[in-house]
């Protein structure tokens, strides 16, 4: 199959959808890999690294026009809509339920589009979203430690303490993928870590893997009120699938927190879990409310494109290999997880939630495939 890798043109996006290592796996299997000139630059993969593993470097027009399968990271944006076409399979993050213009552009073009974020395994895991949550969780602990420094407006506390001086306290609300990874780094820094979680099954699992290294406590309003008073860093890491994040921290509750404490709201991409949360960017990541530093960067993994690109492509490559090796129809017939990723097939919406979100016609995948 002819596999194209497009350069991302969205502002501040430095990731690329395939590493040279991934390209090597595909060329070894006999596929033609065509990478847009400069596509890997932001992730420190020069064109020469792709050429060295047998990929070709081409112009943006050639990559989009000649590919059968096109790999991207972010959803196509308006200047790319004219490039969408029948016969092309697009594999990327799409987030269509939030983007009616793109949904209509995909339908009108007759393209087939598979969304990373809706690939879902039978145990309801989202394998192509998980790597970004891992990275965001780890970054959240780092950001918390960093913004505690006095010159940055923080309390002036070393999170790990030193011999004879107690470490800082990190409170993580939500013990999923973000929360677990934040805990791992905070523990590594030497902090005193508490995780508030509301799923007992998840707490049992965390108890097994983090036993003795964190306090695991049931999450409820009273517990949150009591815990935030003591915290030096709070990490918001809750998720209720398909819903906006619950507002667990009110403006009034912030008043009881320590001055110069840091609140990293990783759940900001779902609206944030505090009343006072609003999205920020890497260029201007923090603001202060009630003397609490708020770090609410909506695309945290964007800060570390080398790591993010590798982590993302580690997760996507098996699916890319399946689509390239078997063709989309056969690959989705064999793998129900990949089938869930198909949002648009030959111009028809095959993902019910997307059709519902925009009041458009839903065509179940099985019906379109036959
Ligand atoms: N800002 C970013 O760059 C970025 C990057 C990746 C993920 N995220 C976001 O981080 C959030 C967490 O993602 P995840 O992958 O860890 O999700 P996850 O589903 O793995 O974990 C969420 C956890 O929150 C728990 N939870 C739900 N309500 C709770 C409550 N009231 N109190 C305590 N715990 C509660 C759930 O039981 C679950 O264990 C999501 O909103 C996700 O979109 C943001």
Image (tube, rainbow, N blue to C red):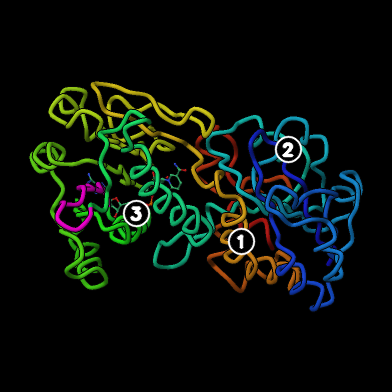
**Which quadrant, please, contains the C terminus?**
bottom right
How far apart marks 3 and 1 lie (CA) works out to: 20 Å
**Residue 334 appears at what percent x and percent y?**
61, 74
* Residue range (magenta): 162-174
Q: Is residue 79 left or right of residue 162?
A: right
Secondary structure type for disc 2:
loop
Who's the residue at 23% across and 52% down the image?
A: 161
- Label 2 environment density (alpha carbons within 10 Å; few <14, some 14–19, many ≥20): some
Disc 3: which residue = 182
Q: Is residue 169 magenta?
A: yes
The extreme front residue here reads 164
Q: Earlier in the sequence, mark 1 or mark 2?
A: 2
Which label is found at residue 310?
A: 1
| Discs 1/2, front | 1
User: Residue 310, relative to residue 295: is it above or below?
Assistant: below
**Residue 249 appears at what percent x and percent y?**
21, 32
User: Residue 142, relative to residue 2: is it above or below?
Assistant: above
Secondary structure type for disc 3:
helix
Circles 1 and 2: CB atoms closer than 8 Å = no
Q: In the image shown, does 354 or 63 lie closer to the viewer?
A: 63
Q: Earlier in the sequence, mark 3 or mark 1?
A: 3
| Discs 3/2, front | 3
Give residue 134's quadrant in the image: bottom left
**Which quadrant, please, contains the N terminus?**
bottom right
Who's the residue at 44% across and 37% down the image?
A: 269
Disc 2: which residue = 9
Q: Main secondary structure of the magenta part?
A: loop
């Amino acid at each position: 199959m002819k596999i194209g890798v497009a350069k991302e043109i969205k502002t501040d996006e430095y990731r690329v959808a395939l590493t040279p290592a991934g390209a090597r796996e595909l060329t070894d299997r006999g596929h033609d890999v065509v990478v847009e000139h400069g596509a890997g630059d932001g992730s420190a993969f020069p064109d020469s690294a792709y050429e060295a593993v047998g990929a070709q470097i081409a112009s943006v027009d050639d990559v989009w026009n000649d590919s059968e399968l096109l790999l991207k990271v972010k959803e196509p944006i308006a200047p790319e809509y004219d490039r969408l076409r029948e016969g092309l399979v697009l594999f990327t993050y799409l987030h269509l339920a939030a983007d009616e213009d793109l949904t209509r552009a995909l339908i009108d073009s007759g393209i087939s589009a598979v969304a990373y974020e809706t690939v879902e395994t039978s145990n309801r895991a989202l394998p192509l979203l998980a790597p970004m949550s891992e990275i965001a969780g780890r970054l959240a602990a780092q950001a918390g430690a960093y913004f505690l420094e006095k010159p940055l407006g923080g309390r002036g506390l070393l999170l790990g303490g030193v011999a004879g001086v107690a470490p800082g306290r990190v409170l993580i609300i939500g013990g999923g993928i973000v929360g677990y990874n934040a805990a791992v780094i905070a523990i590594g820094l030497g902090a005193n870590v508490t995780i508030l979680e509301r799923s007992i099954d998840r707490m049992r699992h965390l108890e097994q893997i983090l036993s003795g290294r964190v306090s695991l406590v049931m999450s409820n309003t009273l517990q949150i009120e009591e815990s935030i008073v003591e915290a030096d860093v709070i990490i918001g890491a809750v998720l209720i699938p398909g819903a906006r994040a619950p507002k667990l921290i009110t403006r009034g509750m912030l008043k009881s927190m320590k001055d110069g404490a840091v609140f990293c709201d990783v759940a900001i991409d779902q609206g944030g879990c505090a009343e006072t949360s609003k999205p920020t960017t890497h260029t201007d990541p923090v603001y202060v409310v009630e003397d609490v530093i708020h770090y609410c960067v909506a695309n945290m993994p964007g800060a570390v494109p080398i790591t993010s690109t590798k982590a993302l492509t580690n997760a996507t490559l098996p699916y890319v290999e399946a689509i390239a090796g078997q063709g989309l129809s056969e690959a989705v017939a064999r793998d129900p997880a990949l089938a869930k990723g198909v949002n648009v097939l030959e111009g028809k919406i095959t993902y019910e939630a997307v059709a519902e979100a925009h009041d458009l016609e839903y065509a179940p995948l099985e019906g379109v495939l036959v």
